[in-house]
Every structure is written in structure tokens, then in C-alpha cells.
Image (cartoon, rainbow, N blue to C red):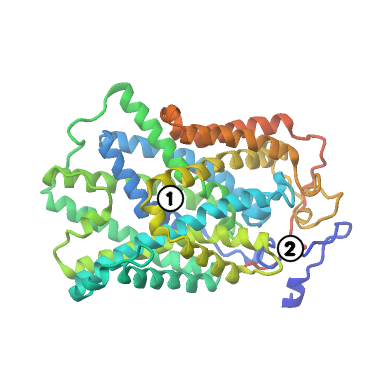
Amino acid sequence: MTALEDRHPATRTGEPATSPELYTYDLAPTRREGRRWGAYNVFTLWANDVHSLGNYAFALGLFALGLNVWGILAAFALASVLLFLLLTLSGFMGHKTGVPFPVMSRIAFGVRGAKIPAAVRGLVAITWFGIQTYLASAVLSALLVALFPSLASLDSGSLLGQSTLGWITFLALWGLQVLIVSYGMQMIRRYMAFAAPTTLLTMCALAVWMFVRADGSISLSDGDPLTGGAMWLQVLQAAALWVVVYGTFVLNFCDFTRSARSRGSIVRGNVIGIPLNMLFFAGIVAVLSGAQFSLDGRIITSPTDIVRTIPNLVLLTAASLALIALTVAVNLLANFVAPIYALVNLFPRRLDFRRAGLVSAVLGLVITPWNLYNSPVVVNYFLGGLGALLGPLFGVIMADYWLLRRARVNVPALYTDDAGAEYHYRRGYNPRAVAAFLPSAGLAVVVALVPVFHAAAGFSWFIGALLAAVLYTAVADRAAPVRDVDGESIAVAAE
């Protein structure tokens, strides 16, 4: 098939013509022969993302909250089972249809209404893209000062809340990510394949070093651990919050599995990457936190706290560069791909994958993420509120796809504006999906942010997802025609 034919696809006989507002090269379903993601690629996605600095900060915080080592392992074991099930179901959707998340959303919300979930997911991702880039730049700044002490003079002063050295390191890592994304999803796949083993070896070596440093003795708790019902409540809350951390990924996992070779690749990659990898992650957390507490009674909040104490400059450099490579990988996966597809979906005539990546990066820069990260109010209320919206979106989309349609999808109809098409609903919006989403989202946000519901705040994602699924199942139009038509006739190679 020529490039010209790729851009102007033919549809099946009898299918409505595709709309240029809904179909672009980047939003089109991937062809079967163009899918190159195997089980190892799916595994590397989780090998990078699970071991992010933010996740370590979350897990190490559980030690400070009173969970002992066994409680932490129990929390991650439970969370990994839930995530494996949710992400496998979400991944199967991407493999079957071959479409990215903004297009997948059209099934439940309509060809125009899908802009709502795509915009919410994209806004969360752009904000976190900026924050994660800032966190990586802080590690790079500290490394440069350690290597070249004279640079300390550049780490003072402030321009829009950032030092000169901070600006240099931030823009350097910002530009690196823009460069990687400019080469498309295949370059991201290759970068993940490089970063995953580097990350695992580095964190394992760091844990071994701390274990030896503590003379093989680690504390199993902070000295005053929770017990009984209080402990198990904390375990459940920790497991629920860990699922919430991945509330973004369970929505747009199809952005990656649309390129998976088979369902078996998704299952195998998820088995190794989620339950096994997460328990490995929890073991490293137990060693790092327990060894440090055994040494000096101090509770660490991040692996960078340990990295900075490495006395050997060569090892310090290697560990710091590995953490930076890891953070870049996480950013590309969790916070760059989603807004790119969302922007392409919003402005299909003006943006392609590369241009949308640049726009996302610019937005992540102009929000001055270091100022957002240093404001607990912004992080808790703005990002917490947006995060609470992801559960209801997931509930509507999954109920529509698995419960009502039973995985039967007419893929060509996702790309047409024809008023009689299956996913046009009412002027391109499905009022029943919106009706189920709004009250569920409102309740989830209230539970997440209002102090009186603090005890249930960790379960806000589940509350919103379950309520939305129940409401949508109750009000959905079951009389709508359901045809199972693949998108091979209009598919193009997304790579």
C-alpha cells in the first residue's frame, strides 16, 4: 500500500465514508502485519513504570505510615492482582481494535463525545510530564554539582522559580524527550527496551549495597507498626491507592497494546511485568527502607536519598544517570503518549504525532511544573480532582465494551460522521454515557477531596468506576445494533 493510499483509506462496501475530522494516519487502527510489540516489550513498559521515583516515594511512605514489611508485601500482592486483571482487559481492547484511546472512547461516548475522556486524560498527563521532567532535572543538577562543584554558583537565584542550573538541566531533558518522541512509537519502544534492564539492575544493585552496608540486618518496621484491624485497613487503602496510581494507564493501555502481536503477548508481558515485577519492587522497597532504618533510625522518602550518600563518585554517577534514564522512560510512557493522541484527536487537521508531541512538551513547560509540584494545594486538589475523574471514565468505557457489546465493535464506524452510524448517537455524543459519568465523577471528586471523607479517599477511583458502570449499564440503549467488524480495510501502519 502506498503512502497516498494510507492517507486516503478505502472502506468496506456498504460502510459510510470516513471523516477527515475523525480519521488521520496517527488515529487509524494498526494493521496486523505492522504490530511489533511482543511480551518483552509489554514487560519493559512495566519494568520502567513500576520503578519510577514517584512510585518509590509512595511505597517508602507506607513504611512511615506504620506498615511493616509483610504489610507492604501484602498490599502490593493484592494491588498487583487487581491491576493485572484491569490492565489485561484494557489491553485486549487495544489488541482487538488496533485503535488508540481517543478512538476507543468513541465506542461509549460517541465520535464527538470522546473528546471529553481524551481531554481529561491528556490534561493529567501534560501536568505530570512537566513535574516528572522537573524531578529528573533535579537529580541531574545534583549530579553535576557533585562532579563539578563550581557549578554550585549556578544553582542559586531564581527565574520564574527556577535557578539557572535548574533551567539548563530541565531544558536539556525536555529536549531529549521531544527528540525521542519525534521518531514515533517505535523509538519509544526501543528506548524502553534499553532503559528496563538498566533500571532493574540499578535498583537491585542499590538494594544489595544497602543490605551489605547494614551488615545484612534490616528493620521489619519503623518500631511502632500498625496491628490488627488498623493494619489491614492500611493494607487495603495502600492497595487501592496503588491501583489509583495506575488509573491513567488502565484507561490508555490500548495506546500500546494496539501494536501487540497477540493477546498472549499481552498476558505474558503483564504476568512478568505486574505481579512478579511489583513484588520484586516491593522487596526492594523493604530492603531500602529497612536497611536505612536499621542504620540510623531514619525513614527515607526516595531512592535519591540513598543515591546521594554513595561515597564513590563513579557509582554515584552511574546510579544518578540510571534514575534519570528511568524517569525519562516513565515520562514517555505515562505522560507523553496520552496527550499526543488526545491533541491529534482534538485537532486532526493541524496536528500529527510529532507536532502534537511538541505542543504537549511546550504546555508542560509553560505551566512551570516546579511551582506546581512545590504547592501541595495544587497537587492535592487539581491533580487529585482530575485523577478522581478517571475512575468513572473507565467504568463507562469498560461496561460498554465488555458487558453490553461483549467485545463486538464496528471499527470503521468509529471514523465516520454519518448520522446513521453506530457511534454517532445524538450529534456525535452519547447522552447516556454522559449521564452516567457526571454524577459518578461528582461523587468521586467529593470523596477524594472533602476532608470528612478522608477515610474513603483512597477508594474514590473504585467508587467512581463501579457507580459509573452500574449507572451506564442501567441506562444504556440495548436496542442499538452491534456488529463485529474489524478495521483491517481502513487500517494503516501506525509505526
- State the residue position of label 1: 272
Q: Does label 1 or label 2 sit earlier along the sequence?
A: 2
Point out residue 311 in the picture as x, y percentages from the top left corner: 13, 63
Q: Position of residue 21 (x, y in %)?
A: 75, 62
Q: Which amino acid, mark 1? A: Ile
Q: Secondary structure at mark 2?
A: loop
For the question of whether residue 286 can be seen, the reply is yes
Query: Residue pushed farthest top?
Result: 229
The one nearer the camera, 247 or 2, is 247
Identify the image quadrant of residue 148.
bottom left
Residue at image point 46% right, 65% down: 365
**Where the C terminus falls, by quadrant?**
bottom right
Q: Position of residue 418 (x, y in %)?
A: 85, 54
Give the residue pinned by disc 2: 23
Q: Is residue 225 left or right of residue 3?
A: left
Indicate which label's residue lies in the foreground, 1 or 2: 2
CB atoms of marks 1 and 2 within 8 Å: no
Q: Is residue 78 visible?
A: no
At x 26% / y 25%, what residue is drawn?
227
Q: Is residue 403 above or below residue 214?
A: above
Give the residue displayed 19% in from the left and 30% down from the top.
Answer: 224
Classify 150 as above or below 473. Answer: below
